[in-house]
Amino acid sequence: MDKTVDVPTGALIMDALHQAKIEILQPCGGQGRCGRCAVIIEGEGARRRSTIRISAEDVAAGYALACQTVIEGDLTVTIPEQEKIERRLVTDKSARKIELPFEYDPTVHQTIRVFQLELPQPSINDSLDDLSRLRQALKEHGVIHLDASLSVLRRLGETLRQASWSPWVVIDFDAPGSETAELIEIQPDPIQPFGLAIDIGTTTVTVHLVDLVNGEVKNSASEYNGQIARGEDVISRIVFAGKEDGLQTLSALVRKTIDTLLDRLQKRTGVSPQQIYKVSVSGNTTMMHLFLGIPPENIRLTPYVPTANQPSVFRAQELDLNIYPLASVDCLPAVASYVGADITAGVLASKLSDTADLTLFIDVGTNGETVLGTNEWMVTCACSAGPAFEGAGVVDGMRATLGAIEEVWVNTHTFEPTIRVIGGKNPTGICGSGLISLLAELFVTGIIDRAGHFKLDLDTPRVRKGKYGPEYVVAWGKDTQHSNDITLKQVDVDNLMRAKAAIYAGFSVLASSVGVDLDEVQQMLVGGSFGQYINVENAIKIGLLPDLPWDRFHFLGNTSVLGSYMALLSHEARLQILAIAEKMTYVELSADNTFFDAFTAALFLPHTEINRFPSVAEIWERHSTESESGSG
């Protein structure tokens, strides 16, 4: 499809593409860091500001980064086939029964209630107005003070008469048992109320459709966050949001993702979005700001202060959500710029706030959020780990979709790999769990040393000097979907080393800040969707997780959406999340050099102080002994 647009001199190719309404990926938010927006240009009317992600051969072939190329004259632009974001089947939980988190009673827990009323008909001798008549009937249900929106008032009289004075109403209470409420819907026919529990993740948006009468999850759906096309991590999206119309674009993209999930749920269940009267939303602080259309730029600027950690409850029509317009939308409370509602909701869901055991809760992701504590006290921090473990920032990295290598085993003697691929077909790249597995295997087999450097003197064609330095060939081109070798390069290892070092340094500094040794941790809870696929042994081998007995690790999956579900059902659970947020003491890791020192010490496999990892030290010493005897 050919399109022609006129743009002023000095505009970027990306601006022209947006004007032409042509979609193209911008995983780094237009900073020129990822190289994914490469296009082919013909003509002399362009100037490349940066070619850092394009080789000299590619430049000679006409490639340019759309986000870094200025238009200075007539130009023809060809867009290569874009990376497809395919949904991994296991991320969609529609087939899995989700248990009720507690014994649910809507009369005790729920703020949204449905009643059928029996009103006396007006007459010459009873001329009470319609709203007062309704208020009198609701007093029997404990409602002493009732408000009604203008939109409901405008159809109140007609609906009462259509219902022959036996209407169905939806009441939104301030709290269960409260005497104050708002009339948000009135119909002549029976009403079945539903709610949504939403987790807006940086990578994935997950939604539970919940029956508010029995509390059960009727169905669930997940989809990649549409914002990925404009930035794979929060910093990239904050940068993009600061551009012209960037904030509106990102806000619209996440709403479009939610609309997609609502359509999917309606097809599965027959439940109309107009039957949804309540929404609970969790997500990190940046995702919440973008969802609400609040400028997020101060989140990344010293002193890292967001606009709001505890937003108000909004109505769906204020946010252009395609559900019942007066549905309440409750954005759960955050703690700081990089410790968001996904963590406060996760702490509730993980039951950390209920236990006396010293517990370490982490969400392995871009921000590396960590909470340490008990039911008496909690400290929290976040470290910028980057998106390496999500497949970004790695040349042959990819998300956990079909074709991703998710686990690797390397033969100690031949250095040949055995791989497991999502979908069972030829691989396309390596996802986060595969990268952890591969890095661990390269380390314990001696292909890389403790500093993460490749050994080029090994008797194997798998280790070689590539175009960008040393690399290990995980899959030869003849065995891949795109006929190109899949490799782990030295720059990839460096990125992974920094990511794991940041996460380990984060929780080790947090522990030392309260005088606790990591060996004292009685249970380690790992939240987040990615956490489900981490192999404990491999994560310990590379120094991503502390060397604790395996039975102390518990992988909980998406605790953020579970906490959101609990808040949707129970006003008490919602208050607990607020109490958790207020109880947490936030530790700013950039306040002194402690984190930098810990980070530097963790830039080894598994750590500079290998005695912190006794199980890994044993493997390493055994391997070193075998290598020496073999060479002798």
Image (spheres, grey):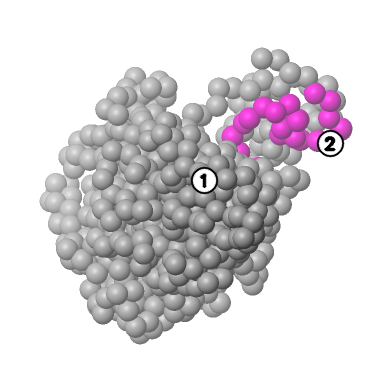
Q: Residue furthest front?
A: 125
Provide the residue designation for mark 1: 164
Residue 85: give x, y in percent of width and height.
47, 32
Residue 185 drawn in magenta? no
Nearer the observer: mark 1 or 2; the answer is 1
Q: In the shown orientation, is residue 283 left or right of residue 252? A: left
Q: In the shown orientation, is residue 607 left or right of residue 241? A: left
Q: Is residue 159 above or below residue 35?
A: below
Which residue type carries mark 1?
A: Ser
Residue in the image at 47% along x and 38% along y: 272
Upstream in sequence: badge 1 or badge 2: 2
Nearer to us in this view, 359 or 145: 145
Label 2: few (<14), some (14–19) or many (≥20) C-alpha neighbours in 10 Å:
few
Provide the residue designation for mark 2: 10
Q: Classify mark 1: helix, strand or loop.
A: loop
Which image quadrant is residue 286 in?
bottom right
Q: Classify mark 2: helix, strand or loop.
A: loop
Q: Main secondary structure of the magenta part?
A: loop
Give the magenta range: 5-31
Which residue type carries mark 2?
A: Gly
Nearer to us in this view, 539 or 382: 382
Residue 269: give x, y in percent of width and height.
38, 35
Q: Name the quadrant of the N terminus.
A: top right
Nearer to us in this view, 343 or 563: 563
Q: Are marks 1 and 2 in contact (CB under 8 Å)?
A: no
Q: Is residue 515 above or below residue 12?
A: below
Q: In the shown orientation, is residue 249 left or right of residue 496? A: right
Is there any visible trace of residue 506 in the rendered image?
Answer: no
Is there any visible trace of residue 619 in the rendered image?
Answer: yes
